[in-house]
Image (cartoon, helix red, strand yellow):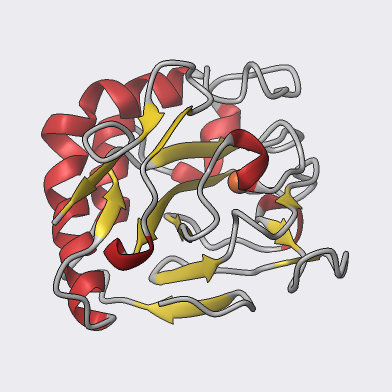
Amino acid sequence: MYLPIPYKIQYDTERFPFKKVIKEILQVADLEKLHELENYDVLDREKDQSTKWHRSYYENFEEKFKPLYLEFVNHLKERFNYEEIIYQKIPTFRAQLVENLGVGEWHKDRAYQHGITEVNFWLPFTDTYDTNTIWSESKEDECDYRPYNVKYGEVLVFDGANLTHGNKINKTKDTRVSVDFRLVDPSKFVNNKGLSVNGITSFTLGGYFEKM
Ligand SMILES: [Fe+2]
């Protein structure tokens, strides 16, 4: 599952119709044009989970997104040949509107208490490119930042705990909508009582993580 350099994998969007599900949850016809429906000042770290789109996603997660997500985690578990896998219970939602940010600051996830054996999966529901996608270095402290252009039907797998990553103001004509989540090899998992950015959930099994 783990490689130090970010890479992409493909999945079948007919079997995992994430885009359709997200459009139903947000009740919009066109994810790429969310910025035409609602305007926000450039989001900082405190506000980057606070738009109406985030609210819709988190309110509907259990009923409308979780079943498909669990199927997808199970698919990844089989694909990477794990008997059991530890996964992030609720994937983090991102909407990067035109002229805005999806994540408020550049960082390594471990700066926010994340465990260093977590592997990040970055799953967009729009085709991403240039400034509407994630930028990352390829090796720790290499500082060779570049955009990872990931299409719908692809997942970027990367070492977010240890690589500095972030995003730039979206100067494209399209909003990016994505979720990201972490998988951990159970043999490498360390129960971590540190709290995630919401200040409530600890990075423990039964807290931020679950096992399947
Ligand atoms: Fe991150």
* 21 to 208, vertically: above or below: below
Q: Nearer the viewer, residue 203 or 19?
A: 203
Residue at 88% x, 64% y: name it. 143
Name of the residue lying farthest toward the right:
143
Side of 85 where 184 appears, left or right: right
117 left or right, relative to 13 = right
Residue at screen point 33% across, 30% down? 26
| Viewer-proximal residue among 135 and 116 | 116
The answer to whether any part of residue 14 appears in the image is: no
Q: Is residue 114 above or below residue 27?
A: below
- 117 or 135: nearer the eye? 117
- Across and down, in percent, residue 139 comes to 75, 73
| Place of residue 165 in the rendered image (x, y in percent of width and height, measured from the top left) | 72, 53
Which residue is drawn at the image coordinates 62% and 77% (left, top)? 4
As drawn, 116 above or below 15 = above
Q: Nearer the viewer, residue 118 or 122?
A: 118
Q: Quadrant of residue 71?
A: bottom left
In the image, residue 172 sits, relative to residue 57, either above or below, namely below
Residue at the spot x=26%, y=71% of the render? 76
Number of numbered labels in the structure image:
0
Q: Indicate the quadrant containing the N terminus: top left, top right, bottom left or bottom right.
A: bottom left
Quadrant assignment, res 207: top left
Q: In x, y percent, where is residue 205?
A: 25, 40
Q: Is residue 7 visible?
A: yes
Q: Is residue 93 left or right of residue 25?
A: right
Locate the C terminus and report the quarter of the image it occupies. Answer: bottom left
> Where does residue 154 sit, x and y in percent of width and height?
43, 72
